[in-house]
Amino acid sequence: MIIVGDIGNTETKFCLINNNKILKRFTLNTKTINYKILKKKFLFFKLNKIILRKVLFCSVVPKTFNIIKNFFKKNYKIKSFELKELNLRKLIKIKVNYKQIGSDRLANAIGIKKSKKNFIILDFGTATTFDVLIDNTYHGGVIAPGLKLSLNTLINKASLIPHIDLKKTNKILGMNTINAVRSGFFWGYLGLIDNIINLIKKETKKSFKIIITGGFSNLFKNSIKTKVILNKDITISGLIKASSLIK
């Protein structure tokens, strides 16, 4: 059994893996993670009775990773690895300085099955990221503000805008504040997405398959002009593949 997980700025995902298949999973708020919460959660899932062989996380929050690392060391007597500690070039060619790339983005890139096709991975996380793979080589990408982050900033700064759940809108013109905000975010981000994809194609002179993942991927999957493939577990798939580097 192995544990892999994705420590993001907002959420942290934990997955129990056996024979490359996800047996159990749960998600915690990254900011609330501490030793007590981890102990309670792992007892609830009866993970205290398993024998762990490997623990691997991709993390963009070092403080939280250290809490999790110490938890596994104390309770399971096992070392936890962060993805960038591994020799990732055994799995994927990386054309840029990967020390400056988020671990989750590298995990996404590793999660793509080797193919003669080129890929753009669009991840709707705390940030909206576009990562480019050409001939199985990571070529960098684009980072734009995340939808939820942008929406929360607007709500916090504009006192007359209420809390809103984002939905697809059929009309551009909103007849009230809520519908106007929904329209702005849906059509605004859809324009951003289509434009960046087109600019990547223009700059690279390549065609791409588009993989989408992350929290708001369902909202846009049927509206992006280019055909897309939804894969909510691409990050976890990359971590499972990378765990083979731990000896």
Image (spheres, rainbow, N blue to C red):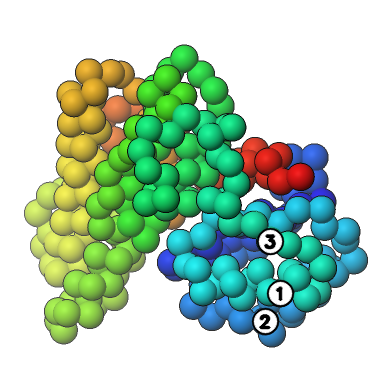
Q: Residue beneath label 1, please?
A: 71
- Residue 88 vs residue 211, the one in the foreground: 88
Give, as a three-letter code, the residue at label 3: Ser
- Does the CB distance between marks 1 and 3 fall below 8 Å? no
Q: Which mark is residue 80?
A: 3
- Residue 39 vs residue 141, the one in the foreground: 141
Residue located 65% across and 38% down the image: 241
Q: Which mark is residue 35?
A: 2
Q: Is residue 208 above or below residue 38?
A: above
Residue located 29% across and 59% down the image: 147
Labels 2 and 1: the sequence-earlier one: 2
Residue located 37% across and 51% down the image: 100
Q: Which marked residue is nearer to the observer: mark 2 or mark 3?
A: 3
- Does the CB distance between marks 2 and 3 fall below 8 Å? no
Q: CA distance from mark 2 to mark 1?
A: 6 Å
Q: Secondary structure at mark 3?
A: strand
Q: CA distance from mark 2 to mark 3?
A: 15 Å
Q: Is residue 101 above or below residue 193?
A: below
- Does the CB distance between marks 2 and 1 fall below 8 Å? yes
Residue located 22% across and 80% down the image: 156
Crowd tier of the residue under label 2, counting other residues whose Cα lies within 10 Å: few below 14, some 14–19, many 20 or above? few
